[in-house]
Image: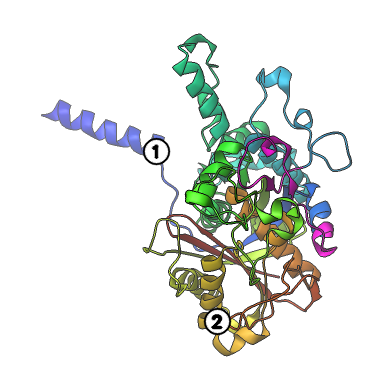
Amino acid sequence: MLRLATSSFMARSFSTLLFKAPPPAPSRRVVVTGMGAVTPFGVGVKRSWEALLDSQCAIQAVDALADSGLQCTIGGAVPRGEGIGAFRTKDWINLQKVRYQEPDFIAFTLAAAAEALKDSGWSPQSDEERERAVRWHLVGGVDNGADGKGVAIGAGTGNIQEVMDVGQLIREKKYRRVSPFFVTRFLTNLAAGHVSIEHGLKGPNHSCATACATGSHSIGDATNLVRHGYADVMVAGGSEGCLDAISVCAFLRAQALSTKATLMYRSCVLTACGRGKFNDRPQEASRPFDSQRDGFVMGEGAGIVVLEEYEHAKKRGAEIYAEVRGYGLSGDSNHITAPHESGDGARRAMQSAMTQSGLALSDVGYINAHATSTPLGDRAENTAVKKLFGIHASRLGVSSTKGAIGHLLGAAGAVEAIFSIKALRDNVMPPTLNLTETTEEFSLNYVPNQPQEKELRAVLSNSFGFGGTNASLLFTK
C-alpha cells in the first residue's frame, strides 16, 4: 500500500510539474499594434484603404469562371501578376523550403501576417524577447517568452478545389498520384500553423471555422487569450481563397449570390433566361442596403492583426491603433442559412460587445455592417441596429464595405475589422457603394457612395455566418 501511495503521489507531482496551468489572471487591456491585408484591391492595408476612400470597386469578371457556364461569373479576386500591388505567391512562399506551392488561403495569410508583424515593429526573435523568455522561465511565470506569443487564424472553407481534384484521382484509381501533402493543403488550421512556424510563435495555436464570422471570432478569441493571461501577443485574423467554380456553384445553389435573373428550374447553370444581369456590369453587383440587392458577390483575401497586452505594447513603445473593448457572440437558433427577420441574434451580439466594453450606446459613432447585399440579411441587421441603439441610431454611420470588395467569407470579419480601425483612426467612414435607392425601413445614414468625415470614439464591426453564428467587435481609441 505504501508503495502504491508513493507512486500515486509521485505521479501527481510529476503531472503537476509538466502540465502547470496558468494561474487566474485579472482581465487585461488588449490593443491592436499591427495590421496586414490582402484584398481584391491588392496587397497592403494602405492600398486597400485608399482605394476604399476613393470609392473604387474591385469586383470584376473572374477568368477562372468565364467558361464555367455558371449564372455568376464575377467576384472580388485578388489581383495577380507583376503589377504594382499585385499578389505573387513566390513573394510569400519559399518553394525551396516547402517543396510545393501552398493554396491561396495559406499564401494570402502569410502575406498579411508578414505585413502585420512588420507594421507592429515586434518580432518574437528579438534579443529583448529572448532575454525576457529566460527571466520568465527562471521564475516560473505564465508568459514564458515564445510560449506567450501565439496565433488565432481561421478560414471558412480551406481548399475545396484540392479535395475535388484528389477525388477525381481516386475515382480513376490513381492513388499514387495523390500528394503526401494533400491533407496539409486543405485543413483550415494550416493557415495558423504556417504563420506559427514562419515566425516562431510557440504560444496558443488556435483556429476556428465559423463561416463568414471566422475572422471576427478569431480576433475575439485571441483577445480573450491575451486578456486572461494565456498570451501577451497574438497574431489573429481570417483568410479565404475559394473563387472557384465549385464554391461559386455551391453558393448559387444556396441562392445566396447575386445573379439578377430568373433562374429556370432553380438551376445554377446557364439557362435560356441568360446570365445574371450584373455579369456585364460587375461593379454594380454588390449593393448592400439598396432596393435592387439580390445576393452577395464572393471575394477572397486575408486580414491579420497583431494584438498585444497594453503594458507589453507600452513598454516597447509600440504605436497603438486601437483598443479591443468588446467582443460579443450569439447564435440565431433559427435557420441553417438565414437569420431571423427580427435580427435578434445580431442585436444580442452587439449588445454583448457593448456590455463588455462598459461604454454607452451614444459612444459608438460608426458600425461596419456585415450587410452582404442579400434581401433578408441586410434587413435583419438594419432592424437589429435600430432596436439596440434606439434614439441614438439616427446619429450613427452604418456602412458595408462589401460593395467595394465583395464578401470575403472567412476573411471578411478580419479585413472589415481593419477597415473599422482605420475609420476610427482617420475619423472617416468608408462608403457603401451602389446605394442609390432604399426602401422606407432603411432610414439611417448608410454612407452612400462617398466617404464621410466624422469624429469617432468607438466603432463596431459585425460578422454573421451560416448556422446562425454571430460576432461583434468593438474598438476604441
What residue is pinned by disc 2?
386
* Residue furthest to the left: 1
Query: What residue is rendered at 53% in x and 48% in y?
Result: 251
Residue 314 in view in this figure: yes
Q: Is residue 408 magenta?
A: no
Secondary structure type for disc 1:
loop
Residue 60 location, x and y as percent?
75, 48
Vertical side of 447 occupied by 166: above or below: above
Secondary structure type for disc 2:
helix
* Residue furthest to the bottom: 391
Question: Few, some or many C-alpha atoms within 10 Å of disc 1 (few <14, some 14-19, many ≥20)?
Answer: few
Earlier-in-chain disc, 1 versus 2: 1
The range drawn in magenta is 50-78
> What amino acid is at disc 1?
Phe
Query: What residue is rendered at 70% in x and 38% in y?
Result: 66
Is 4 left, or right, of 167 in this rendering?
left
Q: Is residue 66 magenta?
A: yes
Is 330 left, or right, of 327 in this rendering?
left
Which of 383/459 is in front? 383
Magenta stretch, main secondary structure class: loop
Residue 311 location, x and y as percent?
66, 59
Please state the total of marks drawn on the protein image.
2
Residue 316 in view in this figure: no
What residue is pinned by disc 1?
19
Quadrant for the C terminus in the image: bottom right
> What's the distance in space between the residues labelled 1 and 2, CA to CA?
48 Å
Query: What residue is rendered at 53% in x and 38% in y?
Result: 188
Residue 174 location, x and y as percent?
49, 11
